[in-house]
Image: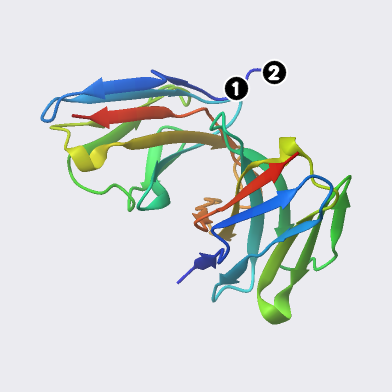
Amino acid sequence: GAGVSQSPSNKVTEKGKDVELRCDPISGHTALYWYRQSLGQGLEFLIYFQGNSAPDKSGLPSDRFSAERTGGSVSTLTIQRTQQEDSAVYLCASSRTGAYNEQFFGPGTRLTVL
Amino acid sequence: AQKVTQAQTEISVVEKEDVTLDCVYETRDTTYYLFWYKQPPSGELVFLIRRNSFDEQNEISGRYSWNFQKSTSSFNFTITASQVVDSAVYFCALSEERNTGFQKLVFGTGTRLLVSP
């Protein structure tokens, strides 16, 4: 079946602009996660969705970052007033509910802020 | 607090050599899960294996094997007879049981494996 998909695959933007990153999880997966992968910080957890609610937003680095999920499916990560330090690969993953279930990752969106 | 340490930043081997990737973790929970993921040059993280804290049996899958030792808080990964296609970054990760069923993965910094012909 189809895996996790993300769009766009690459995004180049100017400092100060807003960007939206999209994630389509595997059908039937109720849990959805966003991570950020950058050279200096490794893989960092950003936010988790269970259905449409986000019980844990502790990883969002600032209030410029927000995310939503609709219909228990597609999720959008929005970064407002982008800064150069936001440049990274943003990864989305989905899984069945339960701490023991493996997460399936998408190919990521590479964001470059000039 | 949870922590995963992969002390080996990069390992280079020649094809057919065996190689072991080290992973040491820290957690206060008695119930937790350990994972290994592979990130090939294409960039997509691929799940390799999961282990729960109550199962210390070693596992073998083809050329891959994993050694989980609670006494040393280690979950090491061995590739036997390495191949060029094994070249990738390998991540070890840890998650703790949560009432919400939420799995927050804490990743190590990864080990880049380069297998040359």
For the point 59% across and 42% down, the residue is: A97
Q: CA distance from mark 2 to mark 1?
A: 9 Å
Residue B41 location, x and y as percent? 57, 33
Specify whether B31 is left or right of A106.
Answer: right
Q: Is residue B106 above or below residue A28?
A: below
Specify whether A95 is left or right of A67.
Answer: right
Both marks 2 and 1 on one chain: yes
Q: Crowding near pointer 2: few (<14 within 10 Å), some, many (20+)?
A: few
For the point 31% across and 33% down, the residue is: A67
Residue A77 shows in this picture: no
For the point 58% across and 59% down, the residue is: B94
Q: Amino acid at mark 2?
A: Gly
**Which secondary structure lies at badge 1?**
loop
What's the mark number on residue A1? 2
What's the mark number on residue A27? 1
Q: Is residue A12 above or below residue A66?
A: above
Residue A45 location, x and y as percent? 41, 49
Pointers 2 and 1 in contact (C-beta within 8 Å): yes
